[in-house]
Image (spheres, grey):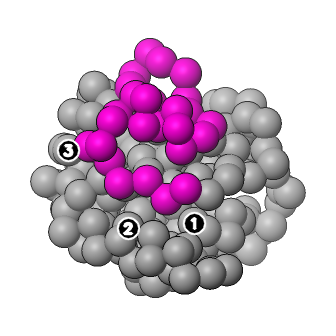
Amino acid sequence: MKNKKQRSSLLKLLYELHNEQVVAYPTEAIFGLGCNPDSEIAVNKLLDLKKRSWKKGLILIAANYKQLLPYIDDEKLLGKTAKDILSSRHNPVTWIMPAKIITPQWLTGQFSTIAVRVSQHPLVHTLCSHFGKPIVSTSANISGLKPCRTSYEVYLQFGKNVPIIHELVGTSLNPSEIRDALTGKLFRQG
């Protein structure tokens, strides 16, 4: 982190994550809402804020592939390696991967897969590194509204209900591409 104010903001977000709260932070293209993926309480708060159905499932973002291993069943990747999958693009890509049988349904929704991304955004990388695991990540917006690209837009949609770190989003113009790790099938263009 660059300065004392940024470190203080990061510590506040980490405190909130550890206390089952939802936080807002910049990602590669838009602001995200995130929480502790192992807390059903936190995930339900996030879904309530977004007015989003649990059935859709959620994305986990991480500082590195190792952080995702408790949630994904990488043995089902049919010989593909994490390096093959994660190093294949320069733009942010969210991968749909087989979920471990123990991965909570509040993360997978109605699916047997889970969406994951190793983030290249410096703040997200730092946040996940210090948190020690991935965080849930979904676009910072109420379902049906445009995703927020600034901290001010997050404030306009959610008010003081969500702690925000006031940093800039990355240079990507669109939310991450979404692809199936097994087949390469494109679900959402980045």
Query: Mark 2 or 3, which is nearer the eye?
Result: 2
Q: Residues within 10 Å of mark 3 (few under 14, many from 20)?
A: some
Marks 2 and 1 in Cβ contact (< 8 Å)? no
**Quadrant where the C terminus is found in the figure:** top right
Residue 102 in sight here: no
Provide the residue span drawn in magenta. 141-166
Taking the image as shown, residue 174 lies to the left or right of residue 152, namely right
In the picture of the structure, the residue carrying the numbered disc 3 is 45
Residue drawn at the location 29% of the way across and 74% of the way down: 15
Q: Report helix, strand or loop for mark 3.
A: helix
**Residue 64: x %, y % from top left:** 60, 77
Residue occupied by mark 2: 13
Query: Of label 3 and label 1, which has the lower sequence position?
Result: 3
What is the quadrant of residue 133 in the picture? bottom left
- Residue 124's disc is 1
- Vertical placement of 17 versus 129: above or below? above
Query: In the image, what residue occupies the spot 40% across and 78% down?
Result: 11
Q: Is residue 4 magenta?
A: no
Q: What residue type is labelled 3?
A: Lys
User: Residue 39: x and y, percent?
Assistant: 19, 62
In this rendered view, identify the residue nearer to me: 94 or 126. Answer: 126
List x then y, in percent, for residue 151.
Answer: 53, 44
- Does residue 1 show up? yes
> Real-space Cα distance between discs 2 and 1?
11 Å
Q: Which amino acid does label 2 sit on?
A: Leu
Q: Do the residues labelled 2 and 3 touch (CB within 8 Å)?
A: no
Which residue is rendered at x = 21% and y = 34% of the image? 48
Q: Nearer the viewer, mark 2 or mark 1?
A: 2
CA–CA distance in space, label 2 to label 3: 16 Å
Number of residue marks: 3
